[in-house]
Amino acid sequence: MNFIYSYGNVILCASIMSEGLVVAGKTLYDKVWDAHVVRQEADGTALLYIDRHLVHEVTSPQAFEGLRLAQRQPWRVNSMVAVPDHNVPTIGLEHGITDPVARLQVETLDANCRDFGITEFNIGDIRQGIVHVIGPEQGATLPGMTVVCGDSHTSTHGAFGALAHGIGTSEVEHVMATQCLIQKKMKNMLISVDGKVGAGVTAKDIVLAIIGEIGTAGGTGYAIEFGGEAIRDLSMEGRMTVCNMAIEGGARAGMIAVDDTTINYVKGRPYSPKAEDWEAAVAAWQDLHSDVDAVFDRVMRLDAASIQPQVTWGTSPEMVLPVDGKTPDPAKESDPVKASGIRAALKYMGLEANTPITDVQVDKVFIGSCTNSRIEDIRAAAAVAKGRKVAANVKLAMVVPGSGLVKQQAESEGLDKIFIEAGFEWRAPGCSMCLAMNADRLEPGERCASTSNRNFEGRQGQGGRTHLVSPAMAAAAAVTGHFADVRTL
Amino acid sequence: MEKFTVHTGLVIPLDRSNVDTDAIIPKQYLKSIQRTGFGPTLFDDWRYLEPGEPGMDHSKRTPNPDFVLNAPRFAGASVLLARENFGCGSSREHAVWALTDYGIRAVIAPSYADIFFNNSFKNGLLPLTLPAEVIDQLFVEAQATEGYQLTVNLAEQQVVTPSGAAFAFSIDDFRKYCLLNGLDDIGLTLQHADDIRVYEAKRQQTAPWLF
């Protein structure tokens, strides 16, 4: 029989077995973790085996250099897939990369991959794109895998019931050399989004609302499993958007249980298992969900119907409002530390307290990034842009597809023409203005409606002001010139 | 990796919560393929009045007089006192390299983001955690007292103030061992190469599609 214990925000579910022993079920995270432990030390440290290592140009050169200095070889090169994305220009690619520092970094990746025999999707290859878009697109991310990359948004791949998280460059080198990571197990958190979201409310709105609730450090030390009807209703693209931003809630890993949506997405991709391997894999993947009596250290429930389209107002993803909201008033905040945080954020963002967010005008619009550059995102933005024009006060509205294949798919559906007709720029794939390592950036004081994941000070360019929104809401801001409720356009 | 045993150093108080790694080292400097040279651009956007780019002579830029790092009394500081959720955001290890290249050996904060915390240990930087009320007290003392130093004793797991007050901190045994001895953990892991091969062979039987 099952008991449910609830204490504060902790819910424990345990099965009482006939012998009287209490044996809790496993969470999805427990299962994937357990399947990858090579060694367990007494102090809780474990050696965890890594199935897939994704590599990009920014966080790998020092790791390759470390391998060479120690005269080590990669443990298993076929676990690695590399792609340049952060520095790649989204315009004028026929001239190559004109920034010499960026060019050297991309050429260094090319040379390292050549020297060590690592598969790389180079610039110009239709498969090139943002690392967190191309991994799933190629089937290189599979259910139940451990996936790492020297990038915090590796949490994206958890949408496939994989344990995926970002690592630093030293750990990149460690995984290259040993195929393992030294890890301590994280705690388990369940975030259940119950019921159905309303029309016009997307995966991005769900995850921004979650971060607004738990805060940017709320998930620190946890692997978060996202569950509930509203999560199960999402496509794989939507699930990737949700898991992508787990790190903005402090959790290195976000995960979603495997179901038919997952399996249908994975089937037939270049790296996906074939023939009898496929049958065996699908059978194994059926277990990639939390047991009904699994124990979570923390549980949070959200009513999907209460979620509205979201817009961030400040300099941290937790500073978020529903579209009918107003900027906060520090005078009404009793906690002095929080009040000073609000004041500093309002000042940086050039906003007054108590301003309806829909009164705020934008200078630029960015639709792209590993959060929102997949085909479904492009379609959602195009549906809003269709038959409309970018507002006169918007200096630049750009759409940056997540990969060459997403771009090709969008063009085959005529979406590029819809955007161009409306006055958007249609660019080549890359990380682009999410972090502004290439030429795509905000000038000081410019305000941007962005489908990316971070609104930190200077993230999109020094002095730039970022408001995070969904693709549909970004398109709505582009055509109206200010934040607007996409449901009432 | 440089060993960390006992370190006594000048304390610099950075009184902001949620300091993200974009603030610690802005993106334009991540184009470097080196591990060194990030010190002059640590906290770049807060530290200088003009925008910075790689390849500039940063000593010729105008320091922001309102930023704590530029106060003459904190020159040469090696212990960074910070607020909660320090190092959140991007996984860039360049943030740790910028701190160590500047000369920081230990960070003291109530909490850290996970990836930054992990990255620190790989570079001989000790990120230690003390309770928020102790941190509040240290902020008051560091701001009030010119030349305020703290001693961080890793073996004893203690932070000692100039008045002799000692605060205990906890740390994983394995991390402590690596820091005290300056050990490269790749070498340690490779001592278990046989275990890794055994695991791989077994996994290849049960999940061949992963190989």
Image (spheres, rainbow, N blue to C red):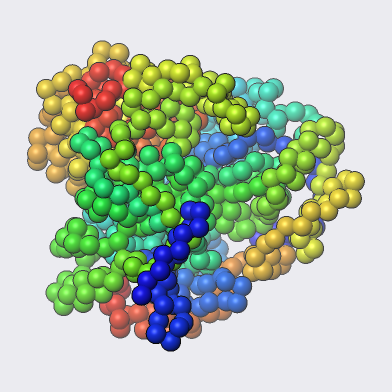
Observer-nearest residue: A31 or A170?
A31
Q: Position of residue A274 (x, y in %)?
A: 17, 71
Nearer to the camera, B184 or B196: B196
Residue at the farthest left position:
A413
Q: How many marks?
A: 0
Q: What residue appears at the point 85 percent right and 37 percent down from the top-left corner?
A: B147
Q: Is residue A50 visible?
A: no
- Residue shown at 22%/50% (left/top)? A233
Residue B177 point in image, percent of width and height: 69, 68
Image location (x, y in percent) of residue A340: 60, 27
Q: Quadrant of the N terminus of chain A?
A: bottom left
Q: Residue furthest right?
A: B163
Q: Is residue B195 visible?
A: yes
Residue at image point 29% right, 65% down: A143
Q: Quadrant of the C terminus of chain A?
A: top left
Q: In this image, A298 relative to A78: left or right?
A: right
Residue sitting farthest toward the bottom = A19
In the image, taking residue B104 as reference, residue A395 lies left or right, namely: left
Q: Image height check: is B15 above or below B175? A: above
- Residue in front for this viewpoint, A364 or A201: A201
Q: Is residue A298 above or below residue A377?
A: below
Vertical comparison of A474 with B86: above or below: above
Quarter where residue A449 is shown:
top left
- Res. A400 image quadrant: top left
As rendered, which of A218 and B199 lies closer to the eye? Answer: A218
Residue A413, percent across and down?
A: 9, 39
- Asked if A208 appears above or below A58 in the picture, the reply is above
Q: What residue is shown at x 77% (from left), y 57% (from top)?
A: B168
